[in-house]
Amino acid sequence: MRRMAATGFVVAVLAVAAALGWTLPSRLVQYVDANFRQGRLYDLNAEERFRLNLLLDEAKRMAAIDKPIAINEPYRRNRVNVYIVRTGLDPHGAIAQGNAAFSSRDDILLIDSSYFQVGNERVLMDSPSESTQALLSTWRVYTYFVLLHELGHRAYQNTLPWWHIANSALHADPAQETAADEFAIKTLLQLYELDQKQAARSVRVMPAPVSTFIDMSGEPVGPGCRLVDHLGTAFALLSEEVLDHAFPLLSAGPTHPAFLKRMVSILGQLGDLSDVRANSDARRSLSLNKAIVSSAQNLMDLHPTEISFDSPVEYVLLDGESLYYFEFGVDAPTQVSVAQLKPNASLYVHNQERPVKRAQIQYAWMNSDGTFTAYRRDGTLTVFRRNGEMVAQVSLAGKLGDRSCVNEMLVPAMPTRYAYILSCEKGALEARLFENGSLRSIVPLQHLGPKERASDGANVVQITIGYRGDVGLYLRDGKDTELIESNQDLSQRSTRRVSDAPDPFQDTFKGKRVPFKSYLYAPAARASSGAVSGAAGRTYYFEGAALFKNLSLMRLDDGGSVTVGHYALSEGLDMERLHQVLPIREYRFISDSEVIVNLDETGTFLVNIDTGKIVPVSHQYFSRREQLIANTKGSWLLYRKYGTRVLYIPSGGEPR
């Protein structure tokens, strides 16, 4: 009876409280108040707060908000509460890094501080450096867009409970998202107009133009063109740096537009604006931005898993069952099961920040016997087991020739028995052959050719390695090119003349002349037993117009060159311009028929040499820090050494 009476009393008290408008604070309110007390909010200075208030005042008018808006203050009912959260201090909080969300129940807007600070630069502040200011200008408008998008949800009363905030992508309505985007665009256009009308104002809400769009009538360009200039450029920058920025790439649910798909949709909306349609410069800029974003979206169409680390990692490897990552200053890798990696989803790894800041590992690979090999910057080569137990260690310092050419490590994409370090001895290119991590032999590469050619001055112009480790060596003597095919242990298998081969490219690296990769070597297919079939490998190259992103994949057959595939971003060009051979900066096979190719200024492409399909996956080439690691099951990794993001692409994925 006493228990029933107590329960009745509690119910009565809650009923009276509800009648008087009193409510218990929600978990979200408790969360934001804890962030305020514990200093986990971004510290706005006076100028940042002034600019942000100008933006929010206009948003209040547009959204018909009849309450004040408070920024980073203790929670109060009867006002809109905006919190800029330093998510790095609270990785398990309500929002993840790079996210933003709005809860109508509590009138709370959360946004990650990544939008307000890039490195040491504050996005809402001006910089004396022109180049830095151009970057900050585009980023500022992108930050405004995200804030206004969330306030657009409030304008349409799109509610989101506390427990859905962290996974809002699972519960959002696509129609609501589109409406919120339209609200953000409309508000930004009005802010540009307001700035033009109040040109004498000392502090403007919107930044100065980055590009010069010329209006043929002599009038200032319209607000739509300025939005293309800022927001379109921001989208392009984010798409070109998918491995670097802090914003999530993937959507966890079917209803919420993913990061890059939303950008494509928004750029389409900007293209419908009347002043953009009337300005050829703006249309051209918009077209380029669309191409950049679409290239990155092609990569997302391969259904990757996005793996985000709290702290940078040195190197990441892959076999059929697990992913392994090396932390700074730690020999033993940490293992993540491939079973945890779900397509089109994100996995957050909360690893510790290590005191060692300078990267030690220059190359790492998995051996066929299940051990790891790491080649460190001090020249030390270490072989160890998965648990970190050292198997062998040797110092290669001072043992890599006379440095008359650039040292380079060649490692197959998949776990391998052999790896190679290329170096020179008195100008002659040599390969140091490693078998499961141990130095086996030194092979002068010129000697792989016919004996009568070994000393007649033939130059090695390219050595390349196939998906399963087969080696192709190209020798050049005058205008003649020979392909020397060898087994993984560098024992010669076949030699044949490559007719009609283009001249090899040259590049300068660290003051030394080194060859670009002019040819793409595809070894002969292997039989089910693992033996190489009797057929010879094939040689491919690319030609086209780099500036206009037009290219063709060419195969060198006995009768000459044959076109295998073609990709064209710009149609209708003079065909004579399409016959320039394009230098290959780097390529890496991810299966027997699929290869990722970096074509220097032309960009990076996923190429199927069997079907001839060419798909752009990045509008620019990958740098030396980008790594591609594949396994025997056709899955592969893309990441940037010493970064915090890894993309795992499962086998069978193919962009539309």
Image (tube, helix red, strand yellow):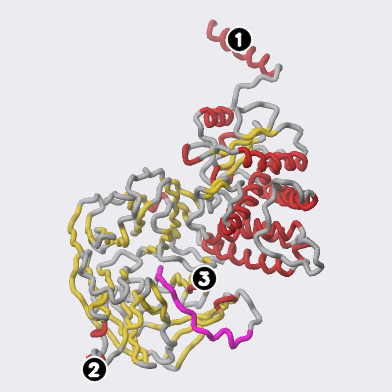
In space, the residues marked 2 and 1 are separated at their CA atoms by: 103 Å
Q: Quadrant of residue 33?
A: top right
Q: Which element type, helix, strand or loop, lies under badge 1?
A: helix
Where residue 184 sits in the image (x, y, percent)?
Answer: 70, 48
Name the residue rendered at 22%, 56% in the picture.
384
Q: Is residue 322 visible?
A: no
Q: Which residue is mark 2?
A: 452
Quadrant of the rendering where the C terminus is positioned: bottom right
Describe the element under mark 3 as helix, strand or loop: loop
Looking at numbered disc 3 in the image, what kind of residue is underneath it? Gly
**Residue 427, image x, y percentages:** 27, 81
Reading the image, the residue beneath label 1 is 9
Question: Is disc 2 placed on a helix, strand or loop?
Answer: helix
Report if residue 100 lies within the magenta region: no
How many neighbours does mark 2 have within 10 angstroms: few (below 14), some (14-19), or many (20 or more)?
Answer: few
Q: Is residue 453 left or right of residue 172?
A: left
What residue do we see at 66% from left, 49% from top? 145
Magenta part of the chain: 574-590
Which amino acid lies under the numbered mark 2 shown in the image of this protein?
Glu
Question: Real-space Cα distance between discs 3 and 1?
Answer: 71 Å
Instruction: Give the mark nearer the N terminus: 3 vs 1.
Output: 1
Instruction: Give the distance between the C-alpha atoms of the residues marked 3 and 2, in whole angstroms.
Output: 40 Å
Q: Amino acid at mark 1?
A: Phe
> Any mark on residue 57, and which?
none
Drawn side of residue 271 relative to residue 575, left or right: right
Say left or right for 26 vs 466. right
For image coordinates 45% across by 48% down, the residue present is 347
Question: In terms of sequence position, does the residue under pointer 3 or pointer 2 come before the other?
Answer: 2
Which of the two labelled residues, at mark 2 and mark 1, occupies the earlier sequence position?
Answer: 1
Would you name the residue on which mark 3 appears?
603
